[in-house]
Every structure is written in structure tokens, then in C-alpha cells.
Amino acid sequence: MSSKLDNVNYGLEKIFEAADDFLPLNGTDYVELYVGNAKQAAHFYKTAFGFQSVAYAGLETGLKDRTSYVLQQDKIRLVLTSPMEKGGEINEHINSHGDGVKVIALWVDDATKAWKETTSRGAKSYFEPRKEEDQDGVVVKSAIHTYGETIHVFVERSAYKGVFLPGFKKWESDYNPAPVGLKFIDHMVGNVGWGEMNKWCEFYAKVMGFAQLVSFDDKDISTEYTALMSKVMSNGNGRIKFPINEPAEGRKKSQIEEYIDFYNGSGVQHIAVATDNIIETVADLRARGVEFLYVPETYYEDVLDRVGEIDEDLQPLKDLNILIDRDDEGYLLQIFTKPVLDRPTMFFEIIQRKGAQSFGKGNFKALFESIEREQESRGTL
């Protein structure tokens, strides 16, 4: 193992001690998107991505100001929420950003302690610890602000046995397309404005006890036309990883600038979801209408010279435009959807790790050239 990776592992061991002292995180509890039409968005994520119906809250459950649908695939839980009244925070969020991630909820053992520890270290409170209960038990939640209008909600659910959260009922549906093999959220990427990357990396280090896994500068992530910089922050047990991107100077407008222009600020750029068989998953997603970035055939001419031997046949990876990269721990397979919204903002990454713990640095040039082709077609490059 290289000394660089030794340093990363040593750093994670040290930060785990600190994180375990004040903010142990069990994993991602759910991701909530504010959307213009939750019913139709739920149908899309079921049909295209294979999510399953779980829970519902709305007029029928006594909720007057919003409607929420909860979907799940293995450990990935999405909440899609639309406003039911004019004005208010949800409408303002949609008017400004379009559909997008509002909440990254983190599963904790003690939501009160998580709020106290983070706010005492400088986090701005979104709401103080509060109990929510129904006949199925009690959930404690608290929340803090992060970049843009994104928030982290801490969810303590050990005393709750219901389908999702108090106020939700089971969502019964006759339409349940099969899953596509998505397992869990591998990482979630945030785009922030010029010069803000270090500020938010320091936030995750100081306020939440995260460690910096790796950083990429504009020499690592650049093409002839555009560039960006990125740092990857991880909690101590590695279950939560947040890469933070910012623009860098280039000849033309980068994907980060395009995102910020259309999202009107900082926010979640993409959600990376893991699979155990990326060939089957991507083939299924394509058959359901999910569109992916195009990778030219020339990428595959020398890719095995760069990454070495892999278990898979190259041809199906080439046919599906799946990228390959290797680090000292193994290799990974990854592919990126086109934006899943009308605005060129949020998209998904499908990733299969075969030992690798990195983020596809060897694919950056091919990936960003593919994104630039999409930007050029939109007239935003």
C-alpha cells in the first residue's frame, strides 16, 4: 500500500476517535427532495430506477401543507415532497432551485446530543431536537444548516416501529416494478461557489468530525476548456462521504458553474448509488429509459493497459459506456446519468467497487469531456 493511502488510513483512524466521541453516524437515513409534483416524481423513480412504494403522508393523513411519498430500494430511501399551499418554504425552494435535494438525513443514536455537539461547534440550527410520535412509537429529530439551502436532519428511531416516521401511513400500490440492484448510497456530491470549497470542508471537519480522504485540483480535473476542484470528506466509519466541488478557472463555463447558474446557488449535484452488478443494473436502467453520458469508443482502446486485469469482459462495459479505474486497493466501475431534471442540475452515479476506495480520478478527463458535449448541446458551455 502506498504511503499516501497509509496516511489516509491513519488520518481516518485518528478522526474516528474524535468522531466517535461526539458524533457517531450509523448511515444515511433518507434523502428528501422538494419537487413540483411528488406523485409523478414517485412514478418516475419507481418506473425508471426500480424504487418500491413504502409510505405516504398528505391530506388523507391530516397533513395540509405538503404531500410526501417515501420510496426505498435496499438501504436507499428517497422522500419526495410537494407543497399543497401557495407561498412557504417548499414553494420558494422549488421556485429558486427547481426539483432538488433539501434534506440529507443522518441516522444517529441520539439526535439531541448530535444537535448539541454540532451547534456548539458552530453549526447553525435549522430546528431544535423535537419528539414526533404516533401509535408506533417515538422518533427524535433535530437539524442543522449546511451549504446553500441543504440541511442535515439527525434521526433517532430506536424507539419507533412504524413504516417510516410518525404521520406516515403505509403506501399500498398495485404498481411495483422490480428493483434494478441498487444497494446503498456510496457518496453524495455538493457543488459550492467560487472559493467556498475549503470553507465547507472545514465545516465538516470542525462541526461534524469528518476527515479529508482525498483532494483534486484543477490539474487533476480539467480538460481543454473547463476545470474544477474537489475534496472528499468522510466520517470516521466511512459510511458517509461528501465530496465538495467548486469551480476553477477555465476557457469556458464548467459544469459546476452551469449547475450553480441553474440551481441558483450551492446544492447537491449527484447521488452515487452502489450496485453489486453494474452491467445488469445499467442494462436494466437503459431499458427503462434512463439516459447516460456517452463515452467515445477510443476510451476503451487502452483502458485495460491503464487499469490492468478485471473480472468482467470489456465488451459489455464498452457497449454500456461504463468507465473503469483502479487504485492501490482494487478497481471500480462507474457511470453517470444525464441530469434527471429539466434543469441541468442533479444526476445519479452508478458505482460498483471491486476493492477500490477512490473516486475514479483516471476517468475525470473522459467524464468531463462527455459532460462538455452535453453542455455544448444545451448552449451553456
Image (cartoon, rainbow, N blue to C red):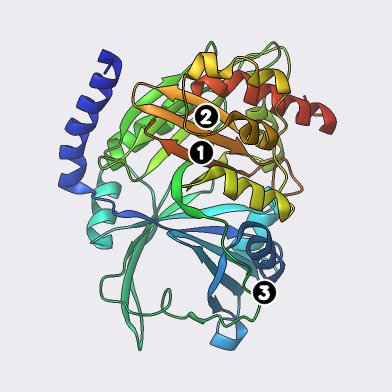
Residue 69 vertical placement versus 235 (above, below): below
SS assignment at label 1: strand
SS assignment at label 2: strand
Disc 1 marks which residue?
189
Q: Earlier in the sequence, mark 3 or mark 2?
A: 3
The label shown at residue 245 is: 2
| Disc 1 residue type (three-letter) | Val
SS assignment at label 3: loop
C-alpha separation, residue under disc 3 versus residue under disc 1: 29 Å
Residue 351 vertical placement versus 12 (above, below): below
| Disc 2 residue type (three-letter) | Asn
Q: Which of marks 2 and 1 is nearer the N terminus?
A: 1
C-alpha separation, residue under disc 3 versus residue under disc 2: 34 Å
Residue 85 vertical placement versus 46 (above, below): below
| Disc 3 residue type (three-letter) | Met
Q: Where is residue 11 shown, x and y percent of the image?
A: 23, 27
Q: Which residue is drawn at 70% across and 40% down?
A: 292
Disc 3 marks which residue?
84
Q: How crowded is mark 3: few (under 14 residues within 10 Å), some or many (20 or more)?
A: some
